[in-house]
Amino acid sequence: MPINFAKELNEEQYKVVAEGDGACLVLAGAGSGKTRAITFRVAYLLEKGIPPENILLLTFTNKAANEMLARVKSLIGFEPKGLWSGTFHHIGYRLVNTYAQLLGFEHRITILDSEDSRSLLTQVLKDEGFDPKSRKLPSVNVIADVYSYSRNAMIPIEEAIDIKHPSSFGIAPDLAHIVAVYEKRKRESGFVDFDDLLCLWLMLLTDHPEVHAKLSGQFNYVLVDEYQDTNRVQARIIQKMAAVHGNILAVGDDAQSIYSFRAADIANILEFDQRFENARVFHLLTNYRSSPEILAVANHVIKQNEHQFKKELLSSMATLEKPIVIQSDTAALEAEKIADFIARQRRFGYKLSEIAILFRSTFHSQQLEFELTRRSIPYDYRGGTQFFARAHVKDVLSFLRAYASTKDSIAWHRLLVQQEGIGLESARKIYDQIRRLDSIQQINHDSTVVQVDKRCSAGWGMVTRTMFELGMKHGSVGEMIRVVKDCAYRFYVESEFKNYKERLDDVEQLATYTDRLTDVKAFLAETALQDQFKNKGQDGIDKVVLSTIHQAKGLEWDTVFVINLTGGAFPNERAALEEGGIEEERRLFYVAVTRARKTLYLSYTALGGRQNELIVSPSPFLEEIDDILLTRENKTGPHVAEATYEPDEQETDWRKKSFLSSIDAF
């Protein structure tokens, strides 16, 4: 049976489906049914007799590609064999493999996954005379990240270093040499990495006119999902692929462009009408997700951005309550309020999985994780790992564990292999001497009590200095953590990880929340108990969702809390130093707001600093919102704080044990 497109779609969607010939930009607001519009457009083309092999549908995830293809199949009643549908990298692989010999490969290409790429880079470092343990160069992970960014942003490696890892700028010539050798090794072996799939695809279209003519002639229609997330390479590929027929349907939302750190370029969507002749712009503004009150806030937030397409979302839902602003004195009190609300909702039979707590950065969730764990409230952490399971937290705590006991072989091995010049075998030899000592004080009094090879001397010297400083600061767990962060760990993390700033932020937050603790052994015991308690019997349980906003994009919940909306935290203070940074942070806030269906809480604290000694201001994004659109609760407002929580016997026992009880005063 033919599809009644006019009946199945709203007026906005139908115009896209029926009139989407030529160069078309579809500005699809949050919750406006963009996937529906794209899939019905494909079905429409197939019904009009366009052969499947003449349609190219590009997505960013395999999940999106599979979902769209399944929807198309459901609509038309059969599988459209021959339709080109998939991620950019998937389509790139097909084409690069087809034209491998033209690109200089003798046989079919072999793809290097991320681990393979790092292994090859490591081999290049060794062969070129760079010791990976010397700290002269950043880690292989950092080099790979900078190199990938430079290619996707189409900028020189030096510029990419300045943007992604400025502390390494002085060794840019060395990095340029390493990636040049890496490129040569790949080509000699017939290898390609993920970035090559895009770059070689673009090379095919740019350097081989006959291939360009064939491919752009084959695809009568090119459709692109999430166009705001394209990088410069992808944007040029799209222009080339649509060159002959000129039928390009780009669907996206400039208000949700939040991935510049991956080299996504918002200019691709903002300048669409300049790059494609006679371009038309469609709008999908009817929102099927959020209440009118939530959308009123979202519209007010995003209109503050200068560089955007002006638009306002309209809700299809009935009127509900205004978003609620919550002020708490401290992060601990903020966490208690939210936990009170969740406990009450659980008592009333509300599904915890319909509650999400969103935050700008991973370390913002730490106090909330403490509180939820203390109350036995299960949660699912998205966009990262639960706090005490994070590698960098374990790294720092390994120093405290080693300080507490020379017999903790796991901690000693973990911290030793982080140090300059110390590998697995060297760590084994060093620890074989340490384990014979009665206490760390023997090392602090005489560092030569442990003999190390010359190659390990710098790394071992860093360990002994750190242990000595820990002995000087042992009166406060928080101060001990800062010793590790500022002594041995900072040097390691800056050279090893592309997100070293976020890792150091996590460590500082851990220090802040443990400043009042004085018994390091009790603290370490309770962190182990917390891990065991948190991981026991959690499968299949209804859980609250904790998520970074980046990870939450595309998802939705009935109730959403956006926390830590304070100046310097959200927007991120580094955003003010970057061109377009504040506007991207505002778009990120917009994404957070539009995740909520029925109820939205916007939460901030009045105090910050190590001892909550600083008065902090609300986020400027919060201050920008017209008061008439919000309900502002005081610190004991009825919507959240009125609920009281009565723990069961098991939880009461846990709370008595928990080290967190010692910082309840926060």
Image (tube, rainbow, N blue to C red):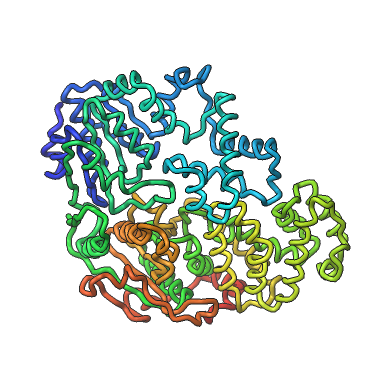
Query: At which x and y percent is residue 236?
Result: 34, 35
Q: Nearer the viewer, residue 330 or 234?
A: 234
Splitting the image into 4 quarters, where does residue 577 fall?
bottom left
For the image shown, how many numbered marks are present on the structure? 0
Query: At which x and y percent is residue 48?
Result: 16, 25
Query: At which x and y percent is residue 574?
Result: 45, 63
In the rendered image, which quarter contains the N terminus? top left
In the picture, measured across the screen, residue 276 lies left or right of residue 417, that is left
Q: Nearer the viewer, residue 223 or 31?
A: 223
Q: Is residue 359 visible?
A: no
In the picture, measured across the screen, residue 126 lies left or right of residue 512, that is right
In the picture, measured across the screen, residue 189 lies left or right of residue 87, that is right
372 lies above or below 222:
below
457 lies above or below 76:
below
Please report the residue visible at 30 percent of the width from the left and 42 percent of the height from the top. Answer: 227
Query: At which x and y percent is residue 45?
Result: 19, 28
Please report the residue visible at 37 percent of the width from the left and 42 percent of the height from the top. Answer: 231
